[in-house]
Image (cartoon, rainbow, N blue to C red):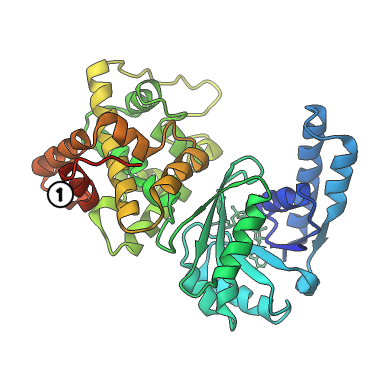
Amino acid sequence: MKVGILGAGSMGSGIAQVAAQYGHAVILFDTNSAQLDKSKTDLIKTLEKLVEKQKISADESTAIQNRISYSNDMSDFKSCQIIIEAIIENLEIKKTVFSQLESIVSESCILASNTSSLSIASIAAACKISERVIGIHFFNPAPIMPLVEIIPAVQTSESVTKISRELIDSWQKVTVIAKDTPGFIVNRVARPFYGEALKIYEEGVADFATIDWAMTELGGFKMGPFTLMDYIGNDVNYAVTESVFTSFYFDPRYKPSFTQKRHSEAGWFGRKTGRGYYDYGKNAVQPEPTKNKHLGDEILERILVMLINEAVEAVFLNVASAKDVDLAMTKGVNYPKGLLAWANEIGLEKVLDKLDSLYAEYGEDRYRASVLLRRMVKANQVFA
Ligand SMILES: NC(=O)c1ccc[n+]([C@@H]2O[C@H](COP(=O)([O-])OP(=O)(O)OC[C@H]3O[C@@H](n4cnc5c(N)ncnc54)[C@H](O)[C@@H]3O)[C@@H](O)[C@H]2O)c1
């Protein structure tokens, strides 16, 4: 299969590298020639490092480079069997580009989008042959992160879903099938990791460092929520939260936080601006957490039950299977355990009790337990 990649930014360049590593001829297109040059230079540097670490040979590095053609002429996509789009996250622009693509490629060419948050059905609606459109959502950095969410729209044909999944599987990725709903699996289920942590901070229960300590030391997460938000960028993370909240018709479970909004408005995006929840300046002294086990356990339990509830709800609403939800969170965002397996371990009844007590205390719909969780507790079931 000849693979076309539209957009040579961080995601497009990473996906092009993966496809070329697995032997495909790749056409990497961008309207910005400087971005194409940067992508080429960055790839050479990345491959040099892989050769140094003896992960690939010098010959393989040359072969990978030779497989990628850089182009600013979209008609070069003519001979591709699949195009993966990774341009700016803007629905109107994506729709225009998909419609342009259709006038160039063959009728059987698959058109995929790497969008993190837009509806695949809307993008597909811009095409005459809408059944060829699908979401193929990689995680950043694409060559390293194993997870890829495959998102068929209501219009997508079964054969397009099957071929797309087989292709990405052949690139040694872990694929999961997700329903075309806001945030797909990962960006939906992970929301409480940020949202509940921010709420705990806003209530004055604990500071950033203490919440991060509880989640890493006691919970086993690789990064605490505030360190992670600073890493992702508060501008980006806030925008995703707001988009998910709006898309879910303002369900309070996804309500964004003023703390994050203000950090974003202040330009305190995180690492990339040198200041976020933490100060990344040269001489900055990092705050010490309050290492109180009782407090830490309370923080961990509250965030964890909210995450589990979101995972259960995703299964209940057939966003994905229980197996895929657990795979997505471990392979897409490196959670220490699948949330449903974790729920079994804690005991579903205990998870439900905690959610019910939060609901009773706050009187907020945000804490409503998933109907599936309640049903499973009643029937004394666990997740398979
Ligand atoms: N960055 C992430 O962590 C991440 C993760 C998963 C998915 N995504 C999604 O992938 C897509 C790309 O994100 P990114 O971070 O690589 O962005 P980016 O800004 O790094 O790159 C976008 C590229 O698209 C090009 N571009 C913009 N409009 C174009 C057009 N009309 N025609 C051709 N090229 C055009 C730009 O020149 C740029 O090189 C977005 O839909 C984003 O939501 C991003």
Label 1: which residue?
Answer: 364
Q: Residues within 10 Å of mark 1 (few under 14, many from 20)?
A: few
Write the residue at 41% across / 54% down: 320
Please count the marks in the image. 1
Write the residue at 47% across / 38% down: 330
Ligand 1's quadrant is bottom right
The N terminus - image quarter: bottom right
| 329 or 34: nearer the viewer | 329
With 23 as the anchor, is 315 left or right in this view? left
| 122 or 369: nearer the viewer | 369
Vertically, is 265 above or below 133? Answer: above
| 157 or 224: nearer the viewer | 157
Where residue 272 appears, x then y in whole percent? 55, 39
Find out if the beta carbon at label 1 lies less than 8 Å from the nearest ligand 1 atom.
Answer: no
Where residue 116 appears, x then y in whole percent? 50, 57
Vertically, is 255 above or below 157? Answer: above
| SS under mark 1 | loop
Q: Is residue 214 visible?
A: yes
Where residue 151 appears, x then y in whole percent? 50, 61
With 35 as the anchor, is 146 left or right in this view? left
Image quadrant in which you'd find residue 384? top left
Vertically, is 335 above or below 23? Answer: above
Write the residue at 42% across / 54% down: 240
With 231 as the anchor, is 40 left or right in this view? right
With 356 as the anchor, is 150 left or right in this view? right
Where residue 345 appears, x then y in whole percent? 31, 30
Image quadrant in which you'd find residue 113? bottom right
Residue type of the residue flagged with mark 1 = Glu
Q: Is residue 29 visible?
A: no
